[in-house]
Image: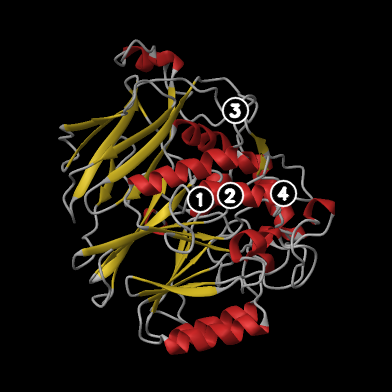
Amino acid sequence: MPCRCHVTRRDLLRWSALVAAAPLVACSDQDEPVARATAAATTAGVDPRTVSPVNLELVTLTETSAVITWYTGIPGTDDGTKRMLPKPADGQISYGTSPSRLTMTAHDKGGLTPYHYVELTGLEPGQTYYYRAASAGKPATPTPLPLVNGNAAGTAAPASADSPFTFTTPQPPPGRHLFSIALCNDLHLGETVAGLVGGTSITGISQAPGLPRYPEIMLEGLVAEATARGADHLLAAGDISSEAAPTDVTRARTLLDRFGTYRQDYFVARGNHDRAHAGAAYAGCGTGEWQGDDCFRDDFFGGSAPTYFSHDLHGLHVVGLDTYDKAGNGGDAGGMSAAQQSWLAADLKAHRDQPTIVFGHHPLVVEGTPFGGGASSMLDATQATQLLATYASTPGVFLHHAGHTHRNHRTVSPAAPGVVLQEVSAAKEYPGGFSLLRVHAGGYALNFYKSRTDLAREWSERSRQELAGLWPQFSLGASVSDRNSVTARDLSGLKPA
């Protein structure tokens, strides 16, 4: 479906210039001499001359593990999205604590694949590691992030062009682990084209013929991965559907039910795409409070309950906002009704000192984007300012989780310095996953994980070609810390799951 970004003319001109300057094929090592490739070891029967390993990313970094992904394609080809055709190959990472002694190895599981996902485990907290990733004996090159001055492959730049990549594991959050919560958003059930930008010549990316719909692939993969990673609960922060069609809302509910029981194990908030709609397709749903018929409310809030709420989980106060509690076409700024604002102020005041996280679709602050951050990218500015002031006087609030921007980004506003404002990238497209909030007695960790089912990895890599291949500059996160962080905080009053 079209992006309801309502970008400005200045944004359109900037994007057009960026797209015009973008390379036609996402390959980064085609200039490597053939002799060097031929001399590299031919691994698992794959000729290195037919393989180009690219898009290397350090996706996840915890105190004891790291997830590293990359893609192998056929140099000089185009699959129709300005990307190399996929080429199955082996995947290996050599790593160690000295750049000259990469004596440990880890491999892809499941055989040859173009969509490499290697997890390093048993790492030491607070230790610096060096690594190289390779397929068919050829080194993988990282996703370039020049527009955001970013580093996709490590926590620091390599010492030189020939040096291995590097990262330093964090120390764990203090205290024992209590429970974990998966944070996700932008599922867009029912969408068929990703990355359309209204008013431009930029084309979107569709699923490859014969494969299932990508929003369902990605949601199924997310639920499976969150469960495998030990999430006790799941919070979905809006845009559950593409346009709130009854079948799409119901299908989203069905797939989320695979995680557990609604309003007990998982919770859902409304996004702008989930607003009430007019038209024959929605006529069987209850009347919307502001406009049209509200199929989303019927499925997730019983047709009459408020679409905002709070709930306690193991002593943690969780507040779910409806940031499109208003009339509109979905392309403007988010907003809360006067009734919701009054309820929220009273709820936070009543739980002033209780550890609290808030989740809702629209961010309060949007910073550090190369593609503009207009009013439509966030909550109404006046309401956002008021909410940050409320957070500053509510010591218990420590995290605000939002979606809508489809990117990983961590912000701490001087207006509420005790609260991390975490944007999480869309579940439905590259990089395609969720953030795992691991709550400890003395703090918490946030770690982003890509969904790793075969079809999820395939679609994630295909959809990175949105915005003519510039999409990773916006969505991945400029630094590893935008998607992985540890924060000390006294949460000793919470209970283990």
Residue topped by disc 1: 256
On-image quarter of the C terminus: bottom left
Q: Earlier in the sequence, mark 2 or mark 3?
A: 3
**CB-based contact (under 8 Å), mark 4 and mark 1:** no
Position in image of residue 281 (x %, y %): 80, 50
Which is more foreground, mark 1 or mark 3?
A: 1
Cα distance between the residues tagged 4 and 3: 24 Å
Residue 393 visible to the viewer: no
**CB-based contact (under 8 Å), mark 2 and mark 1:** yes
For the point 44% across and 52% down, the residue is 434
Label disc, if present, on residue 252 of the rendered structure: 2
Position in image of residue 130 (x %, y %): 23, 41
Cα distance between the residues tagged 4 and 1: 28 Å
Which is more foreground, mark 2 or mark 3?
A: 2
User: In the displayed structure, would residue 185 be above or below residue 100?
Assistant: below
Cα distance between the residues tagged 4 and 2: 24 Å
Residue topped by disc 3: 211
Q: Earlier in the sequence, mark 1 or mark 3?
A: 3
Q: Earlier in the sequence, mark 4 or mark 2?
A: 4
**CB-based contact (under 8 Å), mark 2 and mark 3:** no
Mark 1 nearby-residue class (10 Å; few <14, some 14–19, many ≥20): many
Residue topped by disc 4: 197
Q: How is the image coloured?
A: secondary structure
**CB-based contact (under 8 Å), mark 4 and mark 3:** no
Q: Secondary structure at mark 3?
A: loop
> In the rendered picture of this protein, how many numbered marks are placed on residues?
4
For the point 61% across and 81% down, the residue is 340
Cα distance between the residues tagged 1 and 3: 21 Å
